[in-house]
Image (tube, helix red, strand yellow):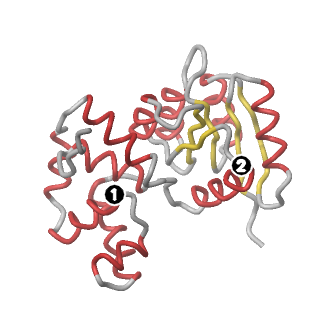
Amino acid sequence: MNAPVRIVVADDQDVVRAGFGALLDSRPDFTVVGSANGGAQAVRVCREVCPDLVLMDVRMPGMDGIEATRRITREQPATRVVMLTTFDLDEYVYDALAAGASGFLLKDMQAERLFEAVRVVAAGEALLAPTVTRRLIAEFTRLRPRALPEQARAVDALTPREREVLRLIAEGLSNQEIAVRLVVGGETVKTHVSRVLAKLGVRDRAQAVVAAYESGLVVPRSG
């Protein structure tokens, strides 16, 4: 049996922290090893306990969840961060993904959705819901159009097939869906995705999507 996923919950509302903590501790494959009422405390707690995953509120007084995410993912690359937000189209979530978060969840989600999401991210995947995350990233890259030179160079280094795979990742497609689209095997897609992530120097699909937009490879749809 695998060791439980070690989790830190960071939220400035006591009730929210306690609620998420109780839910997660109710499952044998999770254990809550710390909590924090703000970004600065979240950074300190993560230094002390080195969790596998952090549930991080986006908006907190003092150091917000975005800066905390940036520091945690920089100092502890193995720790993954999932942002908690009240709104499904929140301008801060794009910044959080760019800062190193592996995805985001709405605070009013059902418990089973929370459990599924934690398992997905802890397993090394990004939490990319095509209907929400893609729209969010597209909207806020459209509002702040820019092509970052380092991202553009990294994308230029991809092969034509790898660029095609990156475009499909940016659409929110899973490996299985990409395999169907490209008429190739699942292992082939897995290899392509791994190479794309390595060449871009990103840790998961969430950051790959950000890179696809910031490089100009994918252009957000208007309207």
At mark 1, the secondary structure is loop
Relative to 139, residue 174 above or below: below
- What is the C-alpha distance between the residues marked 2 and 1? 25 Å
- Is residue 200 found left or right of 48 in the rendered image? left
Residue at 16 percent of width and 47 percent of height:
152
Image quarter of residue 48: top right
- Residue appearing at x 35%, y 68% in the figure: 193
Other residues around mark 1 within 10 Å, as few (<14) / some (14–19) / many (≥20):
many
Instruction: Name the image quarter holding the C terminus.
Output: top left
Q: Name the residue under label 2.
A: 110
Relative vertical location of residue 89 with respect to residue 2 in this rendering, above or below: above
In-front residue for pair 160/90: 90
Specify the amino acid type for callout 1.
Glu
Residue tagged 1: 171
Reply above or below: 129 against 123: above
The residue under the point 49% across, 42% down is 101
Residue 218 lies, in percent from the top left, at 21, 50
Q: Which residue is drawn at 61% across and 35% down?
A: 56
Q: What residue type is labelled 2?
A: Gln
Instruction: Report crowding for label 2: few under 14, some 14 to 19, many 20 or more residues within 10 A (C-alpha).
Output: few
Q: Which of 173 and 99 is in front in this view?
A: 173
Indicate which disc, 2 or 1, sits on the residue closer to the N terminus: 2
Can you give x and y, in whole percent of width and height, for residue 108 in the image? 68, 39
State left or right for residue 81 relative to residue 36: left
Asked which quadrant contains residue 205, the reply is bottom left
The quarter of the rendered structure image containing the N terminus is: bottom right
Disc 2 element: loop
